[in-house]
Image (cartoon, grey):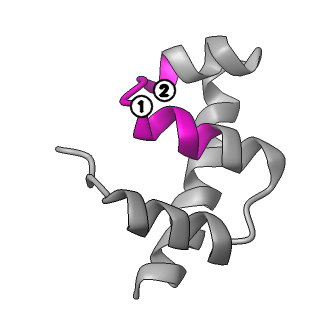
Amino acid sequence: MEPIRFTSIEIQNILHDANFSKDEFELFKLRNKEFTYEECAEQMNMCTRNVYRIAKRMKAKVMRVIY
């Protein structure tokens, strides 16, 4: 499945309105740079499973903001 590509304005709106935690914010930034979950886990110094959990919460917040 192809990830959703946001414009820079959309990214700024999401970051402003989504109320991300520190980890969610960092993951959002990395995923917008097209990092894989495994690469994100390495960059964030955590296991891949934790990154998937954070991504699940982050996606829910993004969906609330854009819909």
Location of residue 50 with respect to 24 vertically, above or below: above
Dot 2 surroundings within 10 Å: few (below 14), some, or many (20 or more)? some
Question: Is residue 67 shown above or below 31?
Answer: below
Q: Is residue 54 left or right of residue 67?
A: right
Amino acid beneath label 1: Lys
Q: Which residue is drawn at the image coordinates 82% and 47% (left, top)?
A: 22
The residue where tag 2 is placed is 37
Q: Residue at x 68, y 39 (%)?
A: 26
Is residue 36 rendered magenta in the image? yes
Provide the residue span drawn in magenta.
27-38
Left or right: 38 in relation to 41: left
Q: Secondary structure at mark 1?
A: loop
| Residue occupying the point 51% across, 15% down | 39
Rendered view: 38 above or below 53: above
Secondary-structure class at tag 2: helix
- Local packing at callout 1 (Cα closer than 10 Å; few below 14, some 14-19, many 20+) is few
Q: Residue furthest front?
A: 9
List the residue tagged with mark 1.
Answer: 33
Residue 39 within the segment the image draws in magenta? no
Residue 19 image offset from top left, x and y in percent: 74, 70
Q: Main secondary structure of the magenta part?
A: helix
Q: Position of residue 62 (x, y in %)?
A: 51, 69
Quadrant housing residue 51: top right
Q: Amino acid at mark 2?
A: Tyr
Quarter of the rendering occupied by the N terminus = top left
Quadrant in which residue 48 is drawn: top right
* Quarter of the view holding residue 36: top left
- Residue lying farthest to the bottom in this orientation: 67
What is the number of the mark on residue 50? Answer: none
